[in-house]
Amino acid sequence: MTKTLPTLGKIKGKDQEKGRAKRDSQPADAVAIPAPGQGKRGESGYLAYLLRQASAANRLHMERALADLGVTLPQFFVLTMLGAYPGISGADVARLALLTPQTVSVIMGNLEKMGAIVRQPHPVHGRIQTIALSDAGRALLAQCKVRATDVDKQLRAGLTPDEEAVVRRWLVTLAVPGEGLAE
């Protein structure tokens, strides 16, 4: 499926004087935009673009899956990291969730208002706060994980276990400093 977008035609008559253009919707002037999987958005496209396209599609799918829980995808990332590494700092969460410290700070504030996290002073470094999930946060994370698992199953659909292992190794290799793209 391709979309056809009309291009702007020549400015004519009174519109020319007012600086406005009329749309020229003649097919000869149209630009065809390929659907995902077609043209450069398909197998002949740049790998980096295809990764971004797949990531965007997955993000949209995850956002829709989490929406009725009132959780955004970045909030889910933060909840997941706090569930896996209780008591870590906001800076650590930012590094693990691949978010900026400023974004994590806003997310933490929202999660705290929701009653999903609790903050406590670090036992040694007084200026650092440790963050952990509250009981409500653990329950919310459990609900989110059910949705994420469903999306993950859909993502793996059609892959054999061997193919999935190859994809996983390749993606990890891209992210490991010195092995892939990360330096």
Image: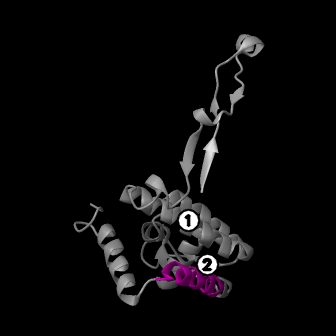
Label 2 – label 1 distance at C-alpha: 33 Å
Q: Which residue is mark 2?
A: 118
Please say if 34 is above or below 173: above
Please say if 70 is above or below 6: below
Say whether residue 9 is visible: yes
Percent position of residue 141, x then y: 61, 83
Q: Which amino acid type is marked by label 1?
A: Ala
Q: Which residue is mark 1?
A: 57
Q: Which amino acid type is marked by label 2?
A: Val
Disc 2 crowd rating (10 Å Cα; few below 14, some 14-19, many 20+) is some
Judged left or right of residue 107, residue 46 is left
Q: Is residue 13 magenta?
A: no
Q: How many marks?
A: 2
Q: Residue at x 66, y 75 (%)?
A: 65
Q: Which residues are magenta?
A: 141-158
Q: Residue at x 66, y 85 (%)?
A: 143
Which quadrant, please, contains the C terminus? Answer: bottom left
